[in-house]
Image (cartoon, rainbow, N blue to C red):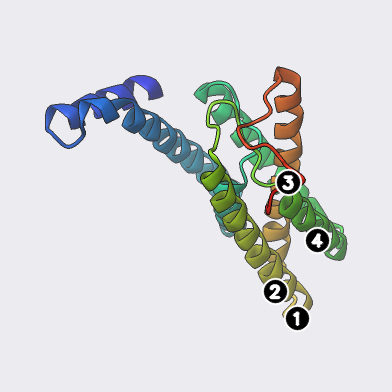
């Protein structure tokens, strides 16, 4: 369904002269990603609202998206699996964060977040075979992933340790989840034999 909607939208853009014919595939891919993300986001917001955890859901989603868009990590092979894995993953992280709050283990998850920040700083961006990056893109994504991770990490730590705001747990859970997504993405890449377009050179200035 998503592919059909994206294809028709791209064809409509070309027909109305908004997009050149040779750029049709690029816009079609962009629409697929946009529609898939919109559906996934609406679903988890509905889940959060139904569970009476709408604000907590926002504190999970915002940092997750801010970092994930640049950090990369695991991607499912089709939009159906992407939708399902995102929704189930969100439910697991939300329930885990709720359990942390219920058990008064906030300090522990804040420590896990620090480890996740270091992990993301070291590994991001993790490419996927469906969207490899060139060298300039890789450097840009790395810089932005690090910046967003640092901002989210510092904000959540301040929220908790200075002001005692429990919502910091959900920001921390989002950052920790990104770290796990990167690890899973690396494992997937090794299994399928994808090494990415960026090669690490000891003599490079990266």
Q: Which residue matches tag 2?
A: 159
The mark found on residue 114 in the picture is 4
Residue at coordinates 12% horizontally, 32% vertically from top-left?
Answer: 16
Crowd band around label 2 with a 10 angstrom C-alpha radius: few (<14), some (14–19), many (20+)? some
The mark found on residue 123 in the picture is 3
Q: Position of residue 190 (x, y in %)?
A: 75, 25
Q: Which residue matches tag 1?
A: 162
Q: Quadrant of the N terminus?
A: top left
Residue at coordinates 33% horizontally, 19% vertically from top-left?
Answer: 4
CA–CA distance between discs 3 and 4?
14 Å
Quarter where residue 157 is shown:
bottom right
Q: Is residue 105 left or right of residue 10?
A: right
Q: Earlier in the sequence, mark 3 or mark 1?
A: 3
Quarter where residue 155 is shown:
bottom right
Q: In this rendering, is residue 143 above or below 92?
A: below
Residue 187 in view (yes/no): yes
Q: Is residue 111 left or right of residue 177?
A: right
Which of discs 3 and 2 lies nearer the camera? The answer is 3
Which of discs 3 and 1 lies nearer the camera? The answer is 3
Q: Earlier in the sequence, mark 3 or mark 4?
A: 4
Residue at coordinates 36% horizontally, 33% vertically from top-left?
Answer: 31
Where disc 2 sits, the SS reads helix
Where disc 4 sits, the SS reads helix
């Amino acid at each position: 369904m998503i592919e059909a909607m994206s294809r028709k939208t791209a064809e409509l853009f070309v027909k109305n002269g908004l997009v050149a014919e040779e750029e049709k595939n690029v816009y079609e891919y962009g629409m697929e990603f946009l529609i898939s993300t919109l559906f996934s986001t609406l679903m988890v917001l509905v889940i959060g609202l139904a569970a009476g955890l709408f604000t907590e859901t926002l504190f999970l989603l915002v940092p997750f998206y801010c970092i994930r868009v640049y950090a990369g990590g695991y991607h499912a092979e089709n939009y159906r699996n992407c939708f399902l894995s995102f929704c189930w993953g969100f439910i697991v992280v939300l329930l885990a964060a709720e359990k942390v709050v219920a058990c008064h283990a906030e300090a522990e998850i804040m420590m896990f977040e620090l480890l996740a920040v270091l992990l993301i700083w070291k590994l991001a961006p993790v490419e996927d075979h469906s969207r490899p990056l060139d060298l300039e893109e890789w450097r840009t994504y790395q810089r932005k992933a690090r910046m967003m991770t640092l901002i989210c990490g510092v904000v959540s730590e301040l929220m908790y340790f200075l002001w005692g705001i429990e919502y910091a747990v959900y920001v921390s859970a989002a950052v920790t989840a990104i770290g796990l997504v990167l690890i899973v993405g690396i494992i997937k890449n090794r299994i399928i034999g994808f090494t990415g377009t960026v090669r690490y050179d000891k003599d490079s200035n990266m």
